[in-house]
Image: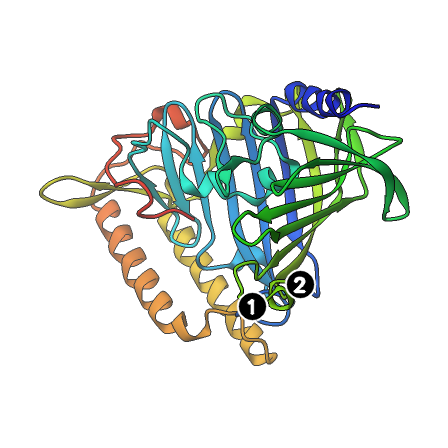
């Protein structure tokens, strides 16, 4: 095995992977600054060439499910449309994606791309870490690859060590050379590890593509003054991956929003703001808000701080008043819309500036 042949094996897998859909959820025991005990992150996302992306971003708690997160949002970006769905409010917000030179920061910073070293989009250049792309193909073209003359064990498995000095090191499974078991990313200013990702429980999910079933993200204080402090873990979080689909098993309808009854769209013009109905059922929406309030109250009674307790009165008042107002307005006008699925190509004018409402 040579550095070039091992690198080509990894690149070939990425070239074979043109669409991916999965769910990942934070495992218990993760350590993040400011994170409440029992809280977790849960994301369902899909990405496809040349430039389609959807992500349902939510947080949960051991006693409050992620679907009750009041700030849960889904971001949808396609070549034709950019829109955000606020789930509790059942509100669609169109925004103008004016970035011609790259993807939205929300997409660039999506953790799964960093973990897989994969960037599927041909419409946008691959983002960079410390000035170097994290996607394998452009990274290997820029760097001076070395295959270190030793075999190291990661998770009891023998691994090749593929290195770009002071940039990144990969530990690649000797028996499954499409599986990266560990990646260290270096801070060039201090020559210390800034990020470490450990991947395990790899599964072949189709078309010769291997995806980990679990990953661990570790972020170090690499800008600290002393070498000892640079080894301090700032974030240590593990995630479980499930519901993986690849390539032709990711259908086009994946990149559409399934709308609940009572969904409206906020339309902003130079003079005014209005709410247009997208699907009927404003009464059902108000019932859903009541059910959500009961779930939050039950969590609080059980001694759980769901993480937004301080904002709960404000959230309830805004949602209730806004929901009633919208319901009354829509009841006074005829509506021909129907509940169902929103095709992103049918959404209205893009009105909000980029990043103003990103999940």
Given residues 230 and 172, the one toward you in this image is 230
Residue at image location 37% in from the left, 67% down from the top: 316
Given residues 130 and 172, the one toward you in this image is 130
Q: Which mark is residue 35?
A: 1
Query: Would you say 34 lies left or right of 316 here?
Result: right
Mark 2 or 1 closer to N-term?
2
Residue at image location 67% in from the left, 63% down from the top: 30
Q: Are marks 2 and 1 in contact (CB under 8 Å)?
A: yes
Given residues 130 and 40, the one toward you in this image is 130
Given residues 261 and 156, the one toward you in this image is 156
Q: How is the image coloured?
A: rainbow
Query: Would you say 93 lies left or right of 34 here?
Result: left
What residue is pinned by disc 2?
A: 30
- The percent position of residue 214, horizontal first and vertical second, equals 74, 47
Residue at image location 72% in from the left, 39% down from the top: 170
- Looking at the rendering, which quadrant does residue 303 occupy? bottom right
The quarter of the image holding the N terminus is: top right
SS class of the residue under badge 2? loop
- The percent position of residue 130, horizontal first and vertical second, equals 50, 43
- Looking at the rendering, which quadrant does residue 162 occupy? top right
> Mark 2 to mark 1: distance in Å?
9 Å
SS class of the residue under badge 1? loop
Figure check: 158 above or below 208: below
- The percent position of residue 199, horizontal first and vertical second, equals 75, 44
């Amino acid at each position: 095995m040579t550095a070039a042949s091992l690198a080509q094996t990894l690149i070939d897998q990425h070239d074979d992977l043109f669409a991916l859909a999965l769910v990942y959820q934070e495992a218990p025991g993760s350590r993040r600054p400011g994170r409440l005990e029992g809280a977790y992150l849960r994301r369902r996302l899909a990405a496809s060439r040349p430039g389609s992306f959807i992500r349902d971003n939510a947080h949960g708690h051991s006693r409050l499910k992620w679907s009750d997160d009041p700030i849960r949002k889904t971001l949808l970006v396609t070549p034709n449309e950019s829109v955000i769905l606020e789930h509790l409010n059942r509100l669609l917000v169109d925004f103008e994606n004016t970035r011609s030179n790259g993807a939205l920061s929300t997409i660039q910073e999506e953790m799964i791309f960093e973990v897989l070293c994969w960037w599927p989009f041909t419409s946008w250049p691959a983002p960079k870490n410390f000035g170097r792309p994290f996607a394998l193909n452009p990274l290997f073209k820029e760097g001076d690859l070395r295959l270190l003359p030793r075999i190291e064990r990661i998770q009891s498995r023998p691994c090749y060590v593929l290195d770009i000095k002071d940039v990144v090191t990969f530990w690649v499974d000797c028996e499954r050379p499409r599986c990266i078991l560990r990646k260290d990313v270096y801070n060039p200013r201090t020559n210390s590890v800034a990020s470490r990702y450990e991947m395990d429980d790899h599964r072949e999910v189709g078309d010769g593509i291997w995806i980990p079933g679990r990953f661990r993200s570790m972020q170090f204080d690499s800008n600290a003054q002393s070498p000892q402090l640079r080894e301090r873990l700032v974030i240590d979080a593990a995630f479980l991956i499930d519901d993986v689909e690849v390539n032709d098993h990711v259908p086009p309808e994946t990149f559409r929003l399934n709308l609940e009854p009572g969904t409206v769209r906020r339309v902003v013009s130079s003079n005014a703001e209005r709410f247009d109905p997208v699907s009927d059922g404003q009464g059902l929406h108000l019932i859903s808000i009541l059910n959500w309030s009961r779930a939050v109250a039950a969590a609080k009674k059980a001694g759980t701080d769901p993480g937004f307790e301080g904002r709960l009165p404000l959230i309830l008042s805004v949602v209730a008043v806004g929901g009633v107002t919208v319901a009354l307005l829509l009841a006074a006008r005829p509506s021909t819309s129907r509940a169902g699925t929103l095709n992103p190509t049918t959404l209205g004018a893009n009105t909000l500036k980029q990043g103003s409402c990103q999940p």
